[in-house]
Each structure stands twice: as structure tokens, then as C-alpha cells.
């Protein structure tokens, strides 16, 4: 790893050297606690994730609950974010809400309501007031875009001066509704030979990523690329694909980027993946960047044409990654081992 750098507004991806060894990045990030699939306080078992689970362990907590005898269910999740709350609280909050909504949509859940909590904010201080005001605007804007109800007290606060210099953090809780359990789509890969696609655009972006912070030790970089309009289009596409029963699994590309999203999808059923990266995108950005508006999906070969036609008609960008293997992990025709060797750190 390189020495600690404060990048600030001068940051560009060109200032980041491309890694000489992909293995070094993978095995360095595998010990990052933010990318671990085991929550020490909640998970004491070594049992794989159950097929009917909707939790992909992507830095949030999720739950699924029955609410009546007719099979209606509600889903809840929580997400936290601290990046750039002090410089762009509105955009940071919109990103957080978009992440939560994208995950629910991937799971076949319709988001319906949201509440927020700001930690380590002193609203009596001008800086704290700026953060709170921006977060409120971001929450309201995202709620309108994603058609969410907001709790009466939009944002709750928690401030203790002795906690300084803990960075301001926003936590949101989102609730969703599932009217038919048959519509639930899990994140785990299902069958060897199925095709893997990424919905969304590839981009040379590593801003505020675990890769940048943990491997390169750059603690101040721009927010990941994000357009809320793109999020809406992509989430609408997932809804339609799910309604047409064209998806076997779906995962939002989140913490750790595409590689760790693939890994989280492969682990439960001890499957692997064979993918080809985009030649026009830097390898580290393609695999470890955390740009918004991307979803990993699994499609059966006999449904590929319908899948492609649906996204083409909707004018939603997508990229063919490769296919699911019996357990080997391959990137650009190079083997990186087998899934049973990857479950210790992830």
C-alpha cells in the first residue's frame, strides 16, 4: 500500500498508479472489515447464506417480515454514509437513498418509506447547520424521485462534543413492501452456465471507494459518479425484468466494486465466474470502483434474447460480463483460484 494521501479537489484517477498485481489488490481488500460478509455481532455460524435471504452483506442490515395471513411482507434495511457530508450533504444523501432503493428493487421489493438520522452534527454550529440543511434537501429530493414517504420528523440528530473528531454520518432506514413472495429475487448466483450481465455504464471512477481508501490509503476523494436520473431508469428496468421473470439473481454493485459484488453472489452456492473486463476502462476502476447506477444480474441462456431486447427497447445500457462457473474465478482468461479459497476473508 502507498502512504496516506489527502487528495481533496485536486484528485484525478490519473494520479493513482494502476496496480501491478491484481492478486495484491484482491487479497489486501479481503481483510478489509467493511467488505466482510460476517457481522461478528449478528452472525456466529459458518452456514452459507440461505437461498431465501435477501441480505447481501453489503454494509447494511436487512430484514424481511410477514405482516398478515395473506402472505404480504415488509422489508427493512439501513444504510450509513459519511463521505462528503461536510462539503456536499445534498448529493451524499441522495446517493445513500439511491443505494438503499436500488438494493430493494434488486430484491423485488417496492420501497415505500424512509427516515434519516444524522450523527455527530451540532446544528447550532454554521457547519452543522449547512450539513443538516443539505441533507434535508437531499432526502426530500430523493423521496420525490423514488416516490417515498418520509417520516414526520424528517431527520433526527445525535450530537456529543466529546466524540470529535468523528466525522458527521447520516444513517437512513428504508421500508419496502412485498405483496407476492414469488417476486423476491436474491443476490446469490443460481446455476453454472448462466450468463452474467452488468446493467449500467462502465466508467473510470474510483472516488470514495474501499479500494482507494484501503489499498491506496487515499482518504479524501470525490463522491462516486452519480446521476439520480440514471438510477431511476436502471431501477425501472430491473422492475420490468423482474416482472417478466427474466432474472435469476440481481445485486447492486456496491462496496468493493464489481469484484466483491461478484464474490458475494458466488459464495452462497459455491459457484464462480468467468468474466471479461471492458478494454476502454481501467482495470482497477472496472473491478473495484464504486460508481453508482450499476447492477449485476444473472440470466438463463434461453432468456438472453428477451433480456437483451427488453433493455434495448428501454434504451438502458448494459454490458455482457461472462458466465457462472462451477467454482473457478477467472478474469480476462486468467484464473484467480476457486471460491472455496475466498470465503475466509469475505
Image: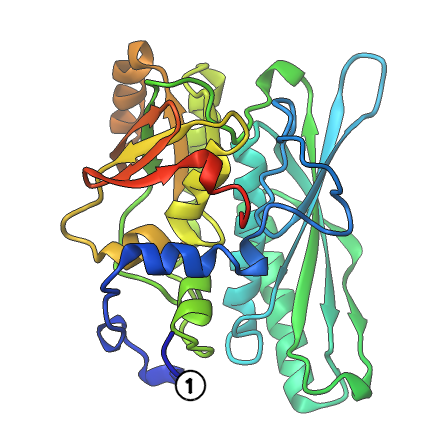
**Residue at x 20%, y 54% (from the top left corner):** 281
Residue farthest top in this picture: 302
Residue 288 shown left or right of residue 130 in the figure:
left
Residue farthest left in this picture: 279
Quadrant of res 222 = bottom left
**Residue at x 81%, y 88% (from the top left corner):** 162
Quadrant of res 76 = top right
> In the rendering, at what x and y percent does residue 129 appear?
68, 82
All told, the count of numbered labels is 1
Q: Write down the residue under mark 1.
A: 6
> In the rendering, at what x and y percent does residue 13 appear?
27, 71
**Residue at x 20%, y 41% (from the top left corner):** 332
Density class for disc 1 (Cα within 10 Å; few <14, some 14-19, many ≥20) is few
Q: Taking the image as drawn, is residue 322 in sight?
A: yes
Residue 270 shown left or right of residue 19 in the figure:
right
In this rendering, the answer to whether 294 lies above or below 138 is above
Quadrant of res 14 = bottom left
| Colour setup of the view | rainbow
Q: Taking the image as drawn, is residue 291 in sight?
A: no
> In the rendering, at what x and y percent does residue 212 appear?
40, 68
**Residue at x 62%, y 68% (from the top left corner):** 135
Q: For the N terminus, which image quadrant?
A: bottom left
Residue 213 shown left or right of residue 163 in the figure:
left
Q: Say what secondary structure mark 1 lies in.
A: loop
Amino acid at each position: 500500500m502507498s502512504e496516506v494521501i489527502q487528495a481533496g479537489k485536486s484528485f484525478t484517477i490519473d494520479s493513482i498508479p494502476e496496480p501491478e498485481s491484481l492478486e495484491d489488490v484482491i487479497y489486501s481488500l479481503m481483510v478489509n472489515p467493511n467488505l466482510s460478509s460476517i457481522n461478528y455481532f449478528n452472525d456466529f455460524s459458518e452456514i452459507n447464506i440461505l437461498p431465501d435471504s435477501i441480505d447481501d452483506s453489503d454494509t447494511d442490515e436487512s430484514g424481511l417480515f410477514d405482516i398478515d395471513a395473506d402472505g404480504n411482507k415488509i422489508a427493512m434495511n439501513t444504510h450509513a454514509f459519511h463521505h462528503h457530508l461536510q462539503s456536499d450533504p445534498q448529493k451524499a444523501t441522495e446517493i445513500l437513498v439511491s443505494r438503499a432503493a436500488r438494493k430493494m428493487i434488486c430484491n423485488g421489493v417496492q420501497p415505500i418509506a424512509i427516515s434519516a438520522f444524522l450523527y455527530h452534527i451540532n446544528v447550532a454550529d454554521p457547519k452543522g447547520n449547512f450539513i443538516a440543511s443539505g441533507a434535508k434537501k437531499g432526502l426530500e429530493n430523493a423521496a420525490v424521485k423514488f416516490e417515498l414517504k418520509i417520516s414526520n420528523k424528517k431527520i433526527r440528530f445525535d450530537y456529543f462534543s466529546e466524540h470529535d473528531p468523528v466525522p458527521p454520518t447520516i444513517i437512513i432506514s428504508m421500508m419496502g413492501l412485498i405483496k407476492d413472495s414469488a417476486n423476491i429475487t436474491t443476490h446469490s448466483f443460481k446455476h453454472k452456465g448462466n450468463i452474467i450481465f452488468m446493467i449500467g455504464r462502465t466508467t473510470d471512477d474510483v472516488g470514495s471507494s474501499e479500494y482507494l481508501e484501503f489499498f491506496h490509503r487515499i482518504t479524501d476523494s470525490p463522491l462516486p459518479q452519480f446521476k439520480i436520473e440514471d438510477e431511476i431508469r436502471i431501477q425501472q428496468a430491473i422492475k420490468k425484468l423482474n416482472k417478466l421473470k427474466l432474472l435469476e439473481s440481481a445485486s447492486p454493485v456496491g462496496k468493493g466494486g464489481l469484484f466483491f459484488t461478484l464474490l458475494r453472489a458466488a459464495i452462497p452456492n459455491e459457484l464462480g465466474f468467468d468474466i471479461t473486463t471492458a478494454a476502454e476502462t481501467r482495470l482497477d476502476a472496472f473491478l473495484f470502483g464504486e460508481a453508482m447506477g450499476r447492477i449485476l444480474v444473472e440470466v438463463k441462456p434461453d432468456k438472453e434474447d428477451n433480456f437483451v431486447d427488453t433493455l434495448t427497447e428501454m434504451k438502458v445500457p448494459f454490458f455482457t460480463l461472462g458466465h457462472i462457473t462451477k467454482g473457478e474465478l477467472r478474469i480476462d482468461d486468467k484464473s484467480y483460484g476457486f471460491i472455496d479459497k475466498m470465503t475466509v476473508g469475505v
